[in-house]
Amino acid sequence: MKAKQVTILGLFAVLLGLMPVAKVNAADLLPPQQAIQEASAKLQEKLQDKSFTKDFAKITQFVNEVIYPHTDFDRISELVLGKIWKTATVDERERFKHEFQTLLVRTYSRAFVEFTDWSVRFLPLEMQDGETKVIVKTEVLQPGIQPIGVNYRMVLRDGEWKAYDIMIEGVSLVTNYRTTFSNEVQTKGSLNAVIEGLVKRNAEALSDKTAANS
């Protein structure tokens, strides 16, 4: 079970382009694929600096700067909360988006350091002119195991392609988090209580520059 959890964590990192991309000519990729490749290249280059990877706070800041332009955090947050989003106040929505983004960036920052033997291979993508939503199909490669199918759900927003979900062998990141937060709201009694819990967890993790498992 532990090995499976580690694998899933590593694969979730692919959503925001944290895994190295197998050598590919960017000109051969379509715009949605290029968004993923661009973030991956920047992160992979930074990974070569071993002193940098020892400072978790700096890693988190850098990862956020790189992946933010390629990730639709607004859409992810709304989809994750589902029905809860409709009844949330404007303040609750904004606070949740901020803390949930921080949570995701922390999660993928850990993977940025820990999962260095993975690479991503892009599968052919067919797009029609004028399409604003696509599913980018890739395979995650690692020596000794079979390729694992990873699909990105992406949307064109303000002229930029952004990821808003990932499906690993059919398992959706958004759906998983929606179940988690729905259960937490029921247990804690309110969305505000869930947000406060996120605030505490994020603050504790980011206060330790070397934290990698909070």
Image: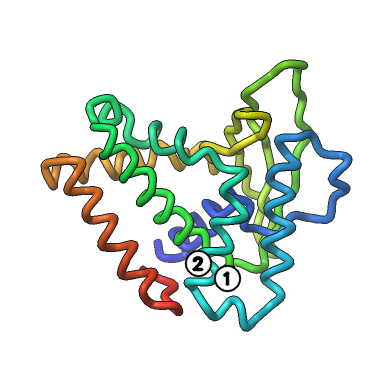
Does 124 sit above or below residue 39? above
Q: Which residue is depicted at the point 65% across and 34% down?
A: 161
Q: On residue 110, which mark appears?
A: 2
Q: Is residue 40 left or right of residue 64?
A: right
Instruction: Give the residue at the far front of this rendering.
Output: 91
Q: Quadrant location of the N terminus? A: bottom left
The x, y position of residue 36, in whole percent, is 68, 46
Q: In what element is the residue under mark 1?
A: helix
Instruction: Give the residue at the far left of this rendering.
Output: 189
Rendering quarter of residue 150: top right
Q: Which residue is depicted at the point 52% across and 51% down?
A: 12
Name the amino acid type tagged 1.
Val
Name the amino acid type tagged 2.
Arg
Q: Is residue 125 left or right of residue 200?
A: right
The x, y position of residue 160, in whole percent, is 66, 34
Q: Mark 2 and 1 residues: CB-CB less than 8 Å, in contact?
A: yes
Q: Callout 1: few (<14), some (14-19), or many (20+) C-alpha neighbours within 10 Å?
A: some
Q: Please give the count of numbered marks on the rendered protein.
A: 2
The x, y position of residue 196, in whole percent, is 22, 53
Q: Quadrant location of the C terminus? A: bottom left
Does 168 sit above or below residue 201? above
Residue underneath mark 1: 113
Instruction: Give the residue at the far bottom of this rendering.
Output: 51
